[in-house]
Each structure stands twice: as structure tokens, then as C-alpha cells.
Image (spheres, rainbow, N blue to C red):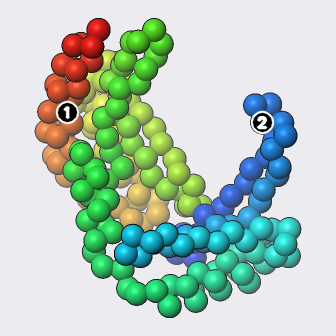
Amino acid sequence: MVTPTQDELHHITRIDIEPDDEHPDRSSTHGWLVRARRQGTRISKFFSDKKHGGRDSALYDHAMKYRDELLEDLPEPDDAAKKSAEARSRSGVVGLNLTFKDIGNGTKKPYVQVSWMDELGKRRAASYSAEKWGLRRSVWNACARLYKELEKKGEAEQEPFEMFRIAYPNLSKQFVEKLGEVEGAS
């Protein structure tokens, strides 16, 4: 088995699904999913290992070939996709947000959550309790983690202190607003 690089995997995600205790009747699914989005339209195609000659063949001979042809035929992406992700980010840092997790009987606890795609294109996440660390430290921990994970892939565009400078004021404001809503609801 050849390990693909992050550059080789742009627009390609590995899918490995097995039956488990919660879903014993689930079918095993193994393969590569090619996805692209242009002008609001999503295009995707799955290449199973079984139907395409194994894991490496499904990737190198089929998924990558399809991806390259697809991207060649699609119009060039404009900066709208990046701007759209930035617009959805209420913290000002893509992948970083404030959430209140329900821990049961209506009690909600504040967390700073961070998410990223790993080297194999799999979504990963971590969260930091604002109750345990305080909001300031939770935001810093999330920024440091996001930077570390993006740096592994060579995609870190901002240093952690720059992420913190942008995110902390926005998340502080959201924290105060959300805390008022949560307390008002109880």
C-alpha cells in the first residue's frame, strides 16, 4: 500500500465504514470519494476498492484520474469559496467556534471547538472547556492546536497569536450573548 501525500489527495477523501455494535447490519464500504464544488454546485463520485482493483488502484488509477479530468473541465474557483467559509466563521478564524454542549438535564457548558482536515482528508476536531480553562485560555489552546494541525499539512496561513487576536474578541462577545440566552432559558 502506497501512502498518498496531502497534495495528491486534494478533493479526495478516504471512506472506510465497517459494521459495529451500534450498526451491526451496516455494509462494509471502502474506497475514495472525489468531491468538488463550483458556483454552488457539488459534484461527487465514489470509487470503491472492490470494484476498482484494490485501494491503490482505486485511488491512483481511477479517483485521481477522474478528479484531474473533472477539475480541468470545471471553471476555475474564484475567491468566493474561501470568502464563503470566512463569512460562515463567526470567530473570524475558519475552523474555530464557540459552542454550548448539552450535558444532560438542560445544562449547557461552553466549549471552544476547533476542526480541521487531517493529512488523509478526514475531518478531525477538538474542544476546550471554557468552564475548566476559562474562555481566554480555551481560545488560545484551540488556536495553538489549529495551527499545529494546519502546519503539519503546510497549510498554516496565520500564526497562533494572530488567530487569537482575531478570534478572542469575537468569541468573547458571543460568549456573553450566549451566556445571557442560556441563563435566560433556565
- Residue drawn at x 27%, y 13% is 185
* Tag shown at residue 90: none
| Picture mark count | 2
**Residue that label 2 marks:** 23
Residue 169, percent from left and from top: 13, 39
Residue 161, percent from left and from top: 21, 48
**Vertical placement of residue 131 versus 2, above or below:** above
Front residue of this view, candidates 38 and 159: 38
Q: Is residue 106 left or right of residue 83?
A: right
Residue 164, percent from left and from top: 21, 44
> Tag 2 or tag 1, which sits nearer the N-term?
2
Q: Is residue 34 left or right of residue 130?
A: right
**Residue that label 1 marks:** 174
> Looking at the rendering, in which quadrant would you find the N terminus?
bottom right
Whether residue 11 is visible to the viewer of this picture, yes or no, is no
> Looking at the rendering, in which quadrant would you find the C terminus?
top left
- Residue drawn at x 84%, y 72% is 51
- Residue drawn at x 46%, y 16% is 103
**Vertical placement of residue 63 versus 141, above or below:** below
**Vertical placement of residue 169 versus 160, above or below:** above
Q: Amino acid at mark 1?
A: Gln
Q: CA distance from mark 1 to mark 2?
A: 37 Å
Q: Amino acid at mark 2?
A: His
- Residue drawn at x 36%, y 50% is 95
Number of residues whose C-alpha sits closer than 10 Å to that of mark 1, classed few (under 14), some (14–19) or many (20 or more)? some
